[in-house]
Amino acid sequence: MQALIFDVDGTLADTEAAHRQAFNAAFAEAGLDWHWDEPLYTRLLSVAGGKERLLHYWRMADPEEAAGSRVSEVIDAVHAIKTRHYAALLREGGLPLRPGIARLIGEANDAGLPVAIATTTTPANLDALLSTPFGADWRHRFAAVCDGHTTPVKKPAPDVYFDVLQRLGLSGNDCIAFEDSANGLRAARAARIPTIVTPTAYTAHHDFDDALRVLPHLGDADEPLALHATHEPCTLVDLATLRRWHGNTLFPGAAVKPASFATPGGLPVGTLHPTVRR
């Protein structure tokens, strides 16, 4: 195990409620009669990317208008307003990192183990979220940061993970990824990275069969023990635990599962290395 790679939204922090609030504030400011309640937003999260989500909903709400010539311009404007509202929400109240995140990143930094970010959110959203817990120079904690600016192709495509691996100079088998959603898991596994999933209320219903572990959170000393869907105790996940789990991901005679993605050029990305099912 030579690096840790973290998704952001839902993984580093439970951000989706704030995103939903920011979207609704943007709709009101832009004069749109749209409102995304929690059940609707949960369904819309199957579409990765804020702008892509806006277009998808617009096509659902008014297909004819969504085919207009100014759609892209309007979506860019609404998304910019939403980003401003999201940043303001985080500045006003902050948003705590999920249990174990700051601790584990600190342990990795102290041990000299590279930590990276693989997300398709915007750089502005990253700054808004991470400046509070890690300070204005938060990027110094990460060996690589790939986001929606550096990698515009969204998950579940694995592009952002391939970009991170290239910057780290590592293969997928050398790392562990952390995700919260099925789209994120599929992206990481398509890049052959063993993946730990910590779902949120928005993603608990997703299929995580290909995950290395599924846990409520990574654990902090003051967090009560919990169980995930398969009743496995949630332990305090430290580097020693991760190294042990990572060492068990490959074993002789294991079946190899085909990847479900192709590269943009149409060539298969290869096969995913096996994981120990639990």
Image (cartoon, rainbow, N blue to C red):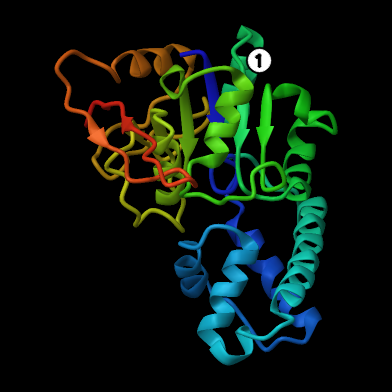
**Percent position (x, y) of residue 3?**
54, 18
**Percent position (x, y) of residue 272?**
32, 31
224 above or below 247? below
253 above or below 40? above
For the residue marked with disc 1, what is the amino acid? Asn
Please report the residue visible at 40 percent of the width from the left and 41 percent of the height from the top.
267
Please report the residue visible at 68 percent of the width from the left and 21 percent of the height from the top.
143
Q: Residue furthest top?
A: 111
Please report the residue visible at 73 percent of the width from the left and 38 percent of the height from the top.
130
Please report the residue visible at 67 percent of the width from the left and 48 percent of the height from the top.
148
Identify the residue under disc 1.
Answer: 109
Q: Residue furthest left?
A: 253
Could you say whether the residue bearing mark 1 is in a helix, strand or loop?
helix
Residue 16 appears in which quarter of the rendering?
A: bottom right
134 left or right, relative to 50: right
Between 25 and 95, the residue placed more toward the observer is 25
**Percent position (x, y) of residue 242?**
42, 18
228 above or below 27? above
Between 46 and 103, the residue placed more toward the observer is 46
82 left or right, relative to 229: right
Between 242 and 228, the residue placed more toward the observer is 242
Whether residue 218 is visible here, answered yes or no, is: no
120 above or below 218? below
